[in-house]
Amino acid sequence: MAGESVQRLLHRYLDTQGGASVLMPFRTTDFSAVIRVARRRHARPAVFLATGTFIRERIEGQSRLAPRYWKARWRLYRDWPRADGLLAVSPEVAEDWRATGYFRADQIHAPTPPVVGPDLDTAARQPLDHPWFDDATIPIVLGVGRLHRQKGFDRLVTAVARLRERRNVRLVLLGQGDEEARLRAQAEALGIADHVDFPGFVDNPWNWMRWADVLVAPSRTETFGFALGECLYVGTPFVADAGPPGPRSIQRATGCGVLVDTSDADTLAKAIERELDEAPPAEVLHRSALAFDSERSAREYLAIVDGQQ
């Protein structure tokens, strides 16, 4: 119901589902409302916090004079450890929350994220209507994500301009964001505007991944990076920045992917060119991504949850 408070919605849900319910709030660091409502129930449900946030960076990055800093610290101390467990998107995120010292060691888990599966394979095989993909002689470099500074697509535009000095390639940037106008202007200034396309947001990015020749993720920060596992699953190599922990986690689990300093345009251009020429076979990439199979992930999540019932 529009306008209904989180607390009221949770009360209603718990009244209908009973005490065996498991609540897993995603994509937020304010879990307090969920925990408080659940803990007031006579039939006590298990509560798990699911997060991809580096909590120490999130809190310490704020001014200590700001009320939100102390509010977050209070919640971290008083509310969040009352959950039955915390499910982190990667071992690095799990360790970050563990290092706060507010959680027991057995509360924090890093189950395999559910990244790939048959549904993704079906979506990737859908037809793609774009004239650039009709010409297999010109490689396509793909970027996927919000057009935001954090994603580093300005680095990719510069690298593609450098690469085009020695070979014909095209760049497709899928997504929307406040950086689009600046990225278009950058491509124009570098003389490659006719070779960079901005299709905007698409419902099915996976068939774009499948038909692209390499996916590049030059993100300045990245806690995980689902697109990297997805592109491997559909047989496309990736190049990502070596700094953020997310791409490192994916490369460690799959044994695939190239990590470089994407802030250096020449380094990034050379890495892209190597993947265009020497990438592992598509089947090898596909098998590597099974490290993030959704069925395996479901078994791990259920084992953690069942252990708290």
Image (cartoon, rainbow, N blue to C red):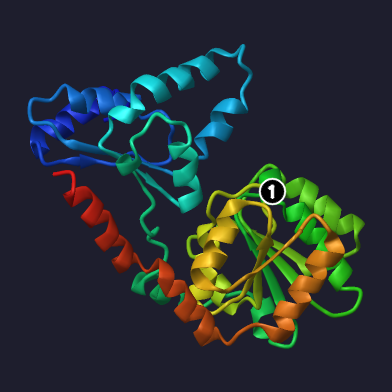
Q: Choose between 5 and 130: the one closer to the eye.
A: 5
Position of 126 with respect to 142 (left or right) is: left
Residue annotated with mark 1: 220
Q: Quadrant of residue 153?
A: bottom right
In the rendered picture of this protein, how many numbered marks are placed on residues? Answer: 1
Residue 252 point in image, percent of width and height: 54, 66
Using a 10 Å C-alpha cutoff, classify the residue at mark 1 as few (fewer than 14 neighbours), some (14 to 19) or many (20 or more).
Answer: some
The reply to whether residue 293 is visible in this rendering is yes
Residue 213 point in image, percent of width and height: 65, 78
| Secondary structure state at the residue bearing disc 1 | loop
Q: Choose between 188 and 216: the one closer to the eye.
A: 216
Residue at 44 percent of width and 32 percent of height: 29
Residue 298 point in image, percent of width and height: 28, 61
Relative to 164, is 82 above or below? Answer: above
Relative to 171, is 14 above or below? Answer: above
- Residue type at mark 1? Arg
Residue 1 point in image, percent of width and height: 26, 30
Please identify the quadrant where the C terminus is shown: top left
Position of 141 with respect to 234 (left or right) is: right
Q: Quadrant of residue 119?
A: bottom left
Residue at 36 percent of width and 30 percent of height: 31
Relative to 147, is 139 above or below? Answer: below
Residue at 61 percent of width and 71 percent of height: 257
